Image: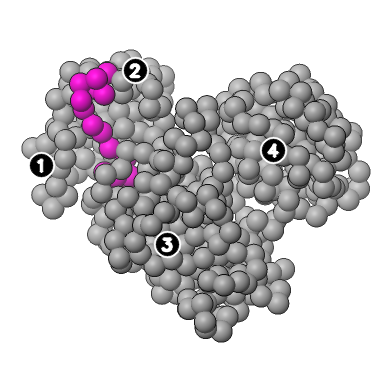
Amino acid sequence: MSTSESGGLKGKQVAVIGLGASGRAAARLALQKGGEVYVSDLRIDAQAAAGGAELRALGAEVETGGHDIERLARADLVVVSPGIPPNAPVLAALRGRGVRWISEPELAVRFFAGPLIAVTGTNGKTTTTLLVAHLLEAAGARAAVGGNVGGGLAPPASELALLGDAPDWYVLEMSSFQLADTERFRPDIGVVTNLSPDHLDRYGSVEAYYADKARLFLNADSSSRWVLPANDEGVRALAGDAPGTRYHFASESGEGVNAFVDAGRLSVRLEASADPEPLLAAEELPLLGRHNRLNALAAALVARVAGADAASLGRGLRTASPLPHRLEPVVESRGILWVNDSKATNVAATRSALESLSRPVVLLLGGKDKGEDFRQLAPALGRGVRAVLAFGAAGPRIVRELRELQDSAPVTLLSGGLDEVVREAAALARPGDLVLLSPACSSFDMFENYEDRGRRFAALAREVA
C-alpha cells in the first residue's frame, strides 16, 4: 500500500474516499501524477454531483451514494479525506480487510519540492499558519500556504503540490484528523501552538486525540526544528524525546525562551544567550486579544528560524490582518463592541478569548455539544463576564453546569435561533461592554459550519447596532 514519489503514480490504482475539497484536490493530484483514480462518496447532493462531474471530465471514475469496498481494497493507495470519521463503516470494512490508508496531506507532501513548515495545536493554528506565510512574504520569500486552513483562506495541501513553480517554503496547517493517517510526513520546521482537549465527539478519549497530534514528531531527525510554547506541559509531553532543535515562545522572557514580550515589545532571539531583537511594540500589533500576541510570537519565531530578519518581521507584524471569525471586530455602536469569534469551537478557545480581553463581556455560548466540560470556563467567567446567553443543542447543559459555579456570571437559556440571542444581547449590553460570540461548540446544530454562523452573527450585530 505504498507508492514512490520519485516515480509518480503511473500505473498505480489510487482510491480517494470523499468528494470534499480535500478529496477533489487529492484526486486531481493523483491524476496529474499518472494514477488510475477511483473516487467514492456516500453523498448524492448537488455539491457531490458537481465535484464528481469535474473529476470524471479529468479522467477519474467516480461513484456517489456508496463505496465499492472491493474496488477500494484492490487499490495500490487509498487516500481518505479528513471529514471521514475513523469509525465510518467504509473504513471499518477496509480495516477488516487489513487495508491501510493515508490522509490527503500525506499524499501531497510526497510531491512537494521544497522545505515544509507544519503547524498544529488545539487553538490558534490558522492565525499562526497564515501569519507565518505573511511574515515570510514580508521577508522576500515565496510561501505557499494551505492544509486545514479552510474558509476559502487557503487551499488543501494537494493544491500546493500541483503548483508549477516550487515556493521557497510550503506552510501547512495540520489538524489531528490529517495527522492521524500520516506515514512519511516530516516537517522541516514543526509548530505546536498549544494543547487542550478537543473533538471528544470524534475521539474516544483525550489521549487518542493527543496521540494523533503527536504524529507530527513521528519522523523527526537531528535536522528537525521545533517551535513550541515554553510553559505547556502537555506539548512538552507530546514532543517527548523527538530529535531536533527546539525553540520556545512565551508571554515573558525566561530561561530557554526565544520569543517573548520584553519591555512592552515583541522580541526574538535564536540563541538563548543572545540579546533580544525587538520587532514592534505590543500595542502596535493589529490583532485583538492577548492570546494573539502568543500566536504572533510563535509565527515570528518560525519565520526567524526560517531565515527572515528582524526588521522584516516587524514590518510584517504591523500589517497583519485579523482573520474572519477569530476575535474579529464587527461593529461598535453606542459604546458597545460586537466581536465575532465563531471559530472558537471548543472550551479552551473560548477561555483563551475571554482571558485576553479587558472590557466587560456579554458572552454568547452554545451550538452542537462536543462533550466538553463547560465548568472549565470558570476562571475566565469570574473575570469581567457580566452575562452568559446559552443557546443551541448544548444550551441546557451549559446552563446546568455553569449554574453549579459560585462565581459564574448570570446564565440565561434561550431556545430560539441566533437572531433571538443577538436581540437579547443588545438589550443586556451597556456602553463599554463587548458582546462576544465565542461559542465553545461546533455549529452543526444550526449552521453549515462556523463561517456560516459567524457571517450570520455579523449581519445580525450590524442590524441591532
Distance Cα–Cα, label 3 vs label 1: 35 Å
Characterize the local packing of mark 1: few (<14), some (14-19) or many (20 or more) Cα atoms within 10 angstroms.
Answer: some
Task: Please state which of the two labelled residues, at mark 3 or mark 1, is closer to the viewer.
Answer: 3
- Which amino acid is tagged 4? Gln
Q: Earlier in the sequence, mark 4 or mark 2?
A: 2
In this figure, which residue is indicated by the disc labeled 1? 10
The residue tagged 3 is 226
* Disc 3 element: strand
Horizontal side of 50 relative to 79 (left or right) equals: right
Q: Which residue is mark 2?
A: 89
> Against 390, is 316 above or below?
below
Point out the tag, 3 or 1, that comes first from the N-terminus.
1
Q: Earlier in the sequence, mark 2 or mark 1?
A: 1
In magenta, the rendered stretch is 93-108
Give me the C-alpha separation between circle 2 and circle 3: 37 Å
Front of the two marks 2 and 1: 2
Position of residue 372 measured from the top left corner of the image (x, y, whole percent) = 62, 31
Amino acid beneath label 1: Lys
Real-space Cα separation, disc 1 to disc 4, in angstroms: 52 Å
Which residue occupies the foreground of this view, 3 or 400? 400
Q: Circle 2 — which element? A: helix
Kind of residue indicated by mark 2? Pro
Disc 4 crowd rating (10 Å Cα; few below 14, some 14-19, many 20+) is: some
**Along the polypeptide, which appears first: circle 1 or circle 4?**
1
Q: Quadrant of residue 408?
A: top right
* Residue located 11% across and 36% down the image: 12
Coordinates of residue 404 in the picture (x, y in percent): 80, 28
